Image (cartoon, rainbow, N blue to C red):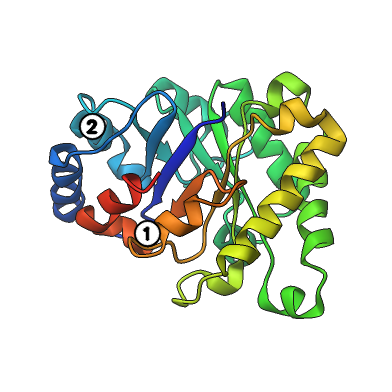
Amino acid sequence: MRKKIAAANWKMNCTLQQAEDLLNKLAAVETHLSNEKISIIGVPYPYLLLAKEKLQTKENMFVAAQNCYTKKSGAYTGEISAEMLQSMNIPFVIIGHSERREYFNETNAMLAEKINIALEYKLQPIFCCGEALSIREAGSQNSFVENQLKESLFHLSEEQILQIVIAYEPIWAIGTGKTASNEQAQEMHQHIRNVLANKYGTSVAEKISILYGGSVKGNNAKELFAQKDVDGGLVGGASLNADEFTTIINSL
């Protein structure tokens, strides 16, 4: 049985005081998590250890970094390595978010390198894929997302691909308040699972969690998560509100 996951991506938000307040609230709320239903909190680098400390007694709630670099170490001022994250016992890392692709020119080939080094240092990647509005309007979203998966993930072994969580982001629905319909979300998630099945077999594809990331809110999470191939969400803005994110967690 594949895991159901409510993942938060704080992006570049929160002062130290705001982060501490939000983490305190998350630590205090009642969530119905288990080994099969988990939550992952992706915080800015300066707050990784704070988040681990605040959430250490919160069962099945984990911390994620929002990115890592392609190299182990060296003269790369401002970058964070997978080895550093491993040394802090950070279990998850977000790789290939649409904003990293768009603003920092991250290519599929670069993301394959990031996936490799994350796995080398025992980090579990949350790999993001998804299309812009122009691609959706042209009707080529399926082939576009399939190409992202092939170029960044298909060099992996069966054992390695089972370590990957995939997050589908319809870029046209991020931060816009616009959400893909339940049917659109299910259609793409099913396509992604079929692409994985064609490469690795159905039994492997059925074990990989695929999250939806596009304006997930407390009032739409339950219906989205009820779709057959939607295994949870990668949540942006709504994750900055403890009460709303708790509602999303409890919608799993």
Residue 224 shows in the view? yes
- Quadrant of image for the C terminus: top left
Vertical arrangement, residue 22 with respect to residue 216, above or below: above
Q: Quadrant of residue 5?
A: top left
Mark 1, secondary structure of its residue? loop
Q: Position of residue 68 (x, y in %)?
A: 54, 40
Vertical arrangement, residue 153 with respect to residue 35, above or below: below
Which residue is labeled 1 in the image? 12
Residue 177 as seen in the image, left or right of residue 161: left
Which residue is labeled 2 in the image? 55
Residue type for callout 1: Met
Residue 15 shows in the view? no
Q: Position of residue 156 (x, y in %)?
A: 77, 28
- Where residue 82 is drawn, which disc sits there? none
Given residues 123 and 208, the one toward you in this image is 208
Residue 175 as seen in the image, left or right of residue 63: right
